[in-house]
Amino acid sequence: MQLDAMYQEIILDHYRNPHHKGLRDPHNAEAHHINPTCGDEVTLRVTLTPASEGAELDEKAIISDVSYEGMGCSISQASTSVLTDLLIGRSVAEGMRTLDAFTEMMQSKGKGEPDEDVLEDAVAFVGVSQYPARIKCALLGWMAWKDAVSQSLDKEGA
Amino acid sequence: MSDRELGRPATGPLDTKAIREDFPILSRTVRAERPLVYLDSGATSQKPRQVLDAEREFYERHNAAVHRGAHQLAEEATDAYESARETIASFIGADSGEVVFTKNATEAVNLVAYAMSNAATADEGMRRFQVGPGDEIVVTEMEHHANLVPWQELCRRTGATLRWFPVTDQGRLDLSDLDELVNERTRLVAFAHQSNVLGTVNPVAPITARAREVGALVLLDACQSVPHMPVDVAELDVDFLAFSGHKMLGPNGIGVLWGRRELLAAMPPFISGGSMIGVVHMSHSTWADPPQRFEAGVPMAPQAVGLAAACDYLSKVGMDRVAAHEHELTEYALKQVGAIEGVRIVGPTEAVDRGGAVSFVVDDIHPHDLGQVLDDQGVEVRVGHHCAWPLHRKLGIVATTRASFYLYNTVEDVDALAEAIRAAQRFFGTRA
């Protein structure tokens, strides 16, 4: 069944038992993203720690927390859960590279050969990329994360 | 009568076996060689050969820009276009001069909204269509975005106020405040004849009667009614009626705005340009009479011909029989789908004043995930908010799954749907 390629066990596990779920404080920025075609939504907060004490928040800053609440399908919820596992503890620059790799995989129409070293559990979503209508579901949390991080860095610069 | 008897041509209202042979797409397979079970006609219907042939024949034999030129092809094309208008008008009990072709139903609604917007800055002669601060437009909470957003925009542009009828938990319109909601300040009431989510068929008469008392115009969104039941504009006593061709076996790219002759005659145009004019000078122009006034540019003649063929097809089957067939399917679906543990029907659970759009939620399975499993089984339904986001918010749900029926659907299709829902429950482990 083609479905099994899409709903890999890793995805269903994250859906049933999401990691790092719930909104937490303190946070640097929050983003609320909605998928207008289905109404699914996610509210996601990012907490960043400067790379060294007293330093500005920049690409070297560490993602100390990602917290979220959301309503949506298994793909959007699991993908956000996987995101928190992958990004918490990494630098913003590493996070952006992971985001790029994830986005590239999602646009691969199932033909991508994702780098498991970079994407870890997120490679499970390669099957979803065969279903154009679901790509937005998988990207929902990631786009919210990107938005929240940009906001955090903008605030710092302002 | 057993649940199965509908499937027998001898006992059901329609010979679905013969009908299905006219729709080539219904014999294809999807995904892993699954027979197609198409339950998304509320979004768009499939097209019979007769419609495809009519459109092809126009292109092959008569193609020319209509209402322009004096050569033979132009004459034939114009004749075909205007004959199509007559057929489509007669399908809804209207005169052909009252039928305006638009791109789709959304554009038909916008045509009225923008005509009112354009009238707002015109002289007193346009008073009937003018809205401004202190005036009210009334819609309902169950509207498709196409019959909501244009009115929000009209209010935003003119300073008028948007109000709406609430929806009850049973999925019916709450008319208890009818006399207050529709009052002397009301300029127009716009509502759906049949909800595209709930299937609810709304009571037109009391709303229209109240609108008449206060002198408000009435626009009916008939996208989900004209394809599925006999509709007669004279009986309905509304002022405007909008529907789309592609939901009633016709081609994409054509919709209809029906309007009362005297209203269309008094209304300013929405889109201006070629062929909607009377006389053009460098500094100003006059307008053509309706319906041409509202059909600027080279119109969609091949699609009009296709839509007329769709009307002929439906008339030949008989709209009362189409409605009876869908009623049986709806009753059957409400029973079969409603009986599945963990499934809740969203909308009236009895097939009374209710059409064949059956929306539901399944415990612990998001509609997108459910739709994916259904699709894997060949069952094609709509998932999401179905362009009725405020309705879903009101009902406290993010999204629903909708099965919608047409004359080519069968009880076996409903059985396939019910079985696919059970398969999804097994797949996601929510039921044994």
Image (spheres, coloured by chain):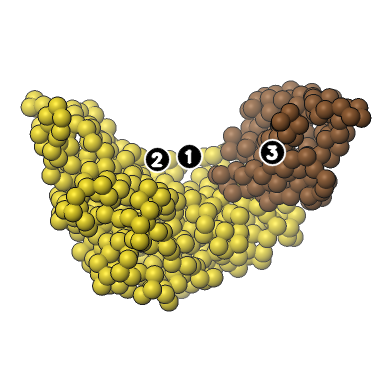
Chain colours: A brown, B yellow
Whether marks 2 and 1 lie on the same chain: yes
- The kind of residue on which mark 1 rests is Arg
A42 to A102, vertically: above or below = below
Is residue B214 in sight in this rendering? Answer: yes
Q: Disc 3 and disc 2: Cα gap in Å?
A: 44 Å
Q: Choose top left, top right, bottom left or bottom right for residue A100.
A: top right
Whether residue A9 sits left or right of residue B80 in the image: it is right
Q: Quadrant of the N terminus of chain A?
A: top right
Give the mark toward the camera: 3 or 2: 3
In the orientation shown, which residue stands out farthest toward the bottom? B176
> SS for tag 1?
loop
In the orientation shown, which residue stands out farthest toward the front? A158
Q: Residue at x 91, y 27 (%)?
A: A52
Q: Position of residue A23 (x, y in %)?
A: 78, 50
Q: How many neighbours does mark 1 have within 10 angstroms: few (below 14), some (14-19), or many (20 or more)?
A: few
Q: How many neighbours does mark 2 have within 10 angstroms: few (below 14), some (14-19), or many (20 or more)?
A: few
Q: Position of residue A115 (x, y in %)?
A: 79, 23
Q: Disc 1 and disc 3: Cα gap in Å?
A: 40 Å
Q: Which mark is residue A29?
A: none
Q: Residue at x 70, y 46 (%)?
A: A43
Q: Which mark is residue B28?
A: 1
Residue where numbered disc 2 is placed: B24
Q: Quadrant of the C terminus of chain A?
A: top right
Chain designation of label 1: B
Chain designation of label 2: B
Q: Choose top left, top right, bottom left or bottom right for residue B184.
A: bottom left
Camera-nearest residue between B417 and B144: B144
Q: Which mark is residue A144?
A: 3
Q: Residue at x 38, y 73 (%)?
A: B180
Q: How many neighbours does mark 3 have within 10 angstroms: few (below 14), some (14-19), or many (20 or more)?
A: many
Camera-nearest residue between B14 and B235: B235
